[in-house]
Image: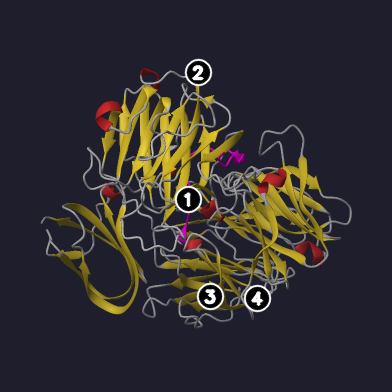
Amino acid sequence: MGIKAKIILLLLSATIVTAQPETETWYFGIGAGIDFTSGKPEMISGPLKTNEGCSIFCNRFGKPLFFTDGQTIWNRDNEVMQNGTGLMGHPSSTQSAVVVEIPNNKNLYYVITALNVGRKQGLNYSLVDMSLDNGRGAVVKKNINLHDRIHEKITVCATPDYKTYWLITSEYGSNNYLAYKIDSAGINPIPVVSPVGSSKDSLIVNNYGYIKASPNSKYIINAHQNKHKLELSSFDYNTGKIKLIDEIELGEGSLTYGLEFSPDSRIIYVGSIFPESKVYQILHPALTDVVDIEFYELGGWSDEYILGALQLGPDKKLYITNDADSTLGVINYPWLVGDAANYQKRALKTIPGTYTTRGLPNFLTNYFYDPMLCDDYLYNEKDEDTSKVNLVQELPPDGINIGYAIRWMKGALWSEEMIPISGGFTAEFQVQLSKGGSGEDITNRGGTGFAFVLQTKSGYELGTGVDGLAYEGLENSFVIEFDQNKDVHDNNGNHLAVLASRGKISPDYNVNGISSTNNIPEIEPDNNLYKCLVSYHNRQLKVYISPESYYLQPQLVIDNFDIENYIDLDKGKAYMGITAATTNIFQETTLKYFRYCTQPIKEDHTSSTPIDNITDYNMQISPNPAIDNITINLENQYDVQGYKIYNLKGGIVKQESVDYTRLQNLKLDVGNLTNGVYIIKLELSTGVKTGKFIINK
């Protein structure tokens, strides 16, 4: 008897998630904060004290560069930035500030601020130059006025190429939306004016509540407390024009405050603060495939606290601040409908001495975009742990363990229904490998890995062999190995291999192998998250794996490939799943999510700068070629915060966060690297320098 766990997932298109380290540290409330840099939210303390609005911008390692409450800017050392006081925002303004990095300039940032309650000279911006004060930054222009009176709400979104931003707000006392274009030339002080929707009258209560652009930059939502409505509008990021789609009635007496979209921009979330604190999920025909507007009340109501801001995180979960309650709510799957979204009212508690207020940081909304296009499917988990039987209703926030930290353990997760294969598919999944909590001394390199498998027998299959990746012996199956062990193909471990058989499949590549490569990122049981993507369209198979949150390029491509030349599909369909095993090594294999759709991968969501296309190398590296050590000459003194070394396939082979002050020469040990060409990106307080070197031993 094995574990059988039905898991209801929304299977999603595998277009690429581009998580942004710029958002990986938050400061908010009274001394509260969240650190996302480990991949999980960890509550921390911060120096900020604000009743509502705030904003923060982090470097490429997720460490704060600077942050603000709308009146004061603090630098990375938690000190007031040079000339950083007296900004015309307000810590009691709903969205008091937002930080925008100027396109094509890594040193200059706009801090855009909004005064509270419709006060005069309400919309302003200041300019921060991070090359000043030894990388701590300084305000070089302050309080440049853009508009006289606005509601205390501002949002910023970008065009798909991130070369143009739009600052959007609503005018006090009228029905005008104002959209300001921001590009490398600066902020255009003349807004695009769109007179749409109901009049935003001068009642103070109508200043309150959020405005949000959708992560895909195509929609705007705006809360109107006194009118008990939510305005949904379309936005044209080419022209800046806004058109009203609908005024969504929320019920007489209802006061709304926090707003957010799902990462795929298909679902609206609203926090009602009166007469009770409630979270509503809204499906609208303009955004998703429904005939009429559908409302879902998540988690019931509460009179124990007042809901504040709603904000997507870099992990694509939705965070909700509970005012003065020292807790945050979390919606774990904001792209799922109803209870499947998994709203936990008090999921996180601030550390002692800190507490929440009504605000969370305001960011460029596109940082959280994750296109998701497919339908619901049921999945099963099966493994050989005979100690218990579990039944769950959705993928838990911490994922599903396919392989537990037990010797000779094997497991699998399958689609309960056969799904279309022959017409093409894209599948994306994320796996976390760890050594587990067995308590034993683990000296071996790691586990055996995991596999992506198609088979036609049932949704409850498990391989027969005690070695390999738990697929050995499956009949009529197609396999992609993400393997850590040495084999006939790869004596160094870490390889991809494609195998198939109409009979019982063998992990012996010489018997059932189709194609393989060992030019992939290192796969280690180091608690890292490994994103994997399998794309099969137009007779081409592509396989990606990355320890980053994006893909640079596929590690394996097979052209003129037809799956049906290798296995027999059942009316074009098969069961799809992930298998894993531990052999004699303790390792946990945790599936964090799994996504499937029939659409092809959108190449424009991969990194726009593949490693082998970088030509702007601006560091002197010696010796080059090198054997064991390299020395980087920076020509001038810089504050160095970290580095990453990539192979030419985009895999990170070495990385480290450091804190070196006024450094001109940096010596690094690269003795563990094999012969080849490598790219190093050095993170400075003032930007990034890039170099290229060769290892030749």
SS for callout 2:
loop
Q: Counting residues from the N terminus, which is met first, the one under dot 2 or under dot 1?
A: 1
Where is residue 504 shown, x and y percent of the image?
38, 25
Which residue is disc 1 drawn over?
404
Q: CA distance from mark 4 to mark 1?
A: 44 Å
Please state which of residues 39 and 260 is positioned toward the viewer in this rendering. 39
Q: Counting residues from the N terminus, which is met first, the one under dot 4 or under dot 3?
A: 4
Of tags 4 and 1, the one toward the viewer is 1
Where is residue 304 shown, x and y percent of the image?
80, 67
**Span of residues in magenta:** 1-21
Q: How many marks?
A: 4
Residue 142 tag number: 3
Q: Residue at x 73, y 71 (%)?
A: 325
Type of residue at label 3?
Lys
User: Colour scheme used in the picture?
Assistant: secondary structure
Of tags 2 and 3, the one toward the viewer is 2
Q: Counting residues from the N terminus, which is met first, the one under dot 4 or under dot 1?
A: 4
Which residue is disc 4 drawn over?
50
Where is residue 508 shown, x and y percent of the image?
28, 32
Which residue is disc 2 drawn over?
570
- Estimate how packed mark 1 is, as few (under 14), some (14 to 19) or many (20 or more) residues with alpha carbons within 10 Å: many
Of tags 2 and 1, the one toward the viewer is 1
SS for callout 4:
loop
Of tags 4 and 3, the one toward the viewer is 4
